[in-house]
Amino acid sequence: MLHDRLLVKAIPDKSERRSSAGLVIPDTVKLATRLAWGEVRGAGTGARHVKTGDRVLFDPEEQGEVELNGERYVILRERDVHAIANEAPERGTGLYL
């Protein structure tokens, strides 16, 4: 990857959504722009905060897709990442922005 570009493998969201009243909302209903989680598989030399192996939160609308060896990946700029997950937080929520 070049500059601040990231190669991300999107993690499919298989959880069902429920309304506050308990009704199941199918995935085909578009309520608002949902952010997606993905795992960084490659990072360019200009990426300062994100490294390979990080779980990142990004907007699926701001992406370019590429297929490598039969698998789909997303190419993002580092600035398009909204959060990075921390699996073992010392304090806080486990996300840093």
Image (spheres, helix red, strand yellow):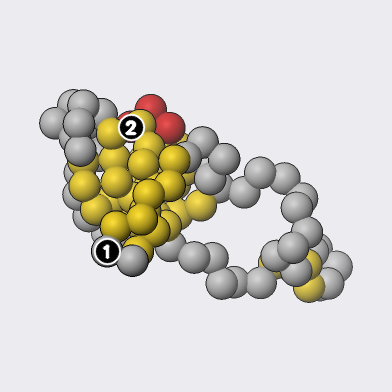
Instruction: Find residue 4 and report its horizontal and vertical position in percent.
Output: 25, 29
Q: Residue at x 75, y 53 (%)?
A: 30
Residue 95 appears anywhere in the view? no
- 61 or 79: nearer the viewer: 61
Q: Residue at x 20, y 31 (%)?
A: 2
Q: Which amino acid does label 1 sit on?
A: Asn
Q: How many marks?
A: 2
Instruction: Find residue 87 and report its horizontal and vertical position in percent.
Output: 30, 59
Q: What residue type is labelled 2?
A: Glu
Assign a secondary structure to mark 1: loop
Which of pointers 1 and 2 lies earlier in the amino acid sequence?
1
Q: Mark 1 points at which residue?
A: 69
- 70 or 50: nearer the viewer: 70
Task: Look at the picture and state if 72 lies above or below 24.
Answer: above
For residue 51, the mark is none
Q: In this view, does 16 lie to the left or right of 42?
A: right
Assign a secondary structure to mark 2: helix
Q: In this view, does 70 lie to the left or right of 42?
A: right
Q: Residue at x 29, y 40 (%)?
A: 6
**Which quadrant of the rendered structure holds the C terminus?**
top left
Residue 70 appears anywhere in the view? yes
Q: Mark 2 points at which residue?
A: 78
Instruction: Find residue 85 and report its horizontal and vertical position in percent.
Output: 35, 51
Marks 1 & 2, CB-CB < 8 Å contact: no
Tell me the crowding category of disc 2: few under 14, some 14 to 19, or many 20 or more residues within 10 angstroms, Cα based: many
Instruction: Find residue 91 and report its horizontal and vertical position in percent.
Output: 33, 49
Q: From the image, state whether disc 1 or disc 2 is nearer to you.
A: 1
Q: In this view, does 1 lie to the left or right of 18?
A: left
